[in-house]
Image (cartoon, rainbow, N blue to C red):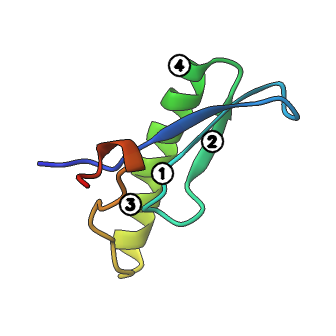
Amino acid sequence: MSDYHINIFASVEDGGYIADVPDLLCCSAFGMTPQEALSEVLTAKSLWLQTAAAEGKPIPNPTYRPAIYQVA
């Protein structure tokens, strides 16, 4: 089973790290370290999916892959 891709990047403006799930609209989180940002976004992803299911909203299949993983 495939899972949703997670991006983690440094945010100079925020003084920490941002993690996001590109396939899930507005699903992101902040942490002081990359590990903290990952932990927070995993919680956000779980809540995003639970809320969408509870409200009967469509849940997108994981499709996002960075360009470095795409076959030319």
Residue at 83% from the left image edge and 29% from the top image edge: 12
Which element is circle 1 on? Answer: loop
Tell me, yes or no, if residue 60 can be seen here: yes
Task: Looking at the image, tell me whether mark 3 or mark 2 is earlier in sequence order.
Answer: 2
Q: Is residue 60 above or below residue 15?
A: below
Residue labelled with disc 2: 29
Indicate the amino acid at tag 2.
Ala
Looking at the picture, tell me which residue is in the foreground, 12 or 52: 12
Looking at the picture, tell me which residue is in the foreground, 50 or 72: 72
Please tell me how crowded label 1 is: few (under 14), some (14-19), or many (20+) other residues with Cα within 10 Å: many
Indicate the amino acid at tag 1.
Val
Distance from the alpha carbon under mark 1 to that under mark 2: 9 Å
Residue labelled with disc 3: 49
Which element is circle 4 on? Answer: helix
Q: Is residue 36 above or below residue 42?
A: above
Question: Relative to 35, is 12 on the left or the right?
Answer: right
Residue at 11% from the left image edge and 48% from the top image edge: 1
Distance from the alpha carbon under mark 4 to that under mark 1: 15 Å
Counting from the top left corner in percent of width and height, residue 72 is at: 26, 55
Residue labelled with disc 1: 21
Indicate the amino acid at tag 3.
Leu
Q: How many marks?
A: 4
Question: Relative to 23, is 11 on the left or the right?
Answer: right
Task: Looking at the image, tell me whether mark 2 or mark 4 is earlier in sequence order.
Answer: 2
Indicate the amino acid at tag 4.
Gln
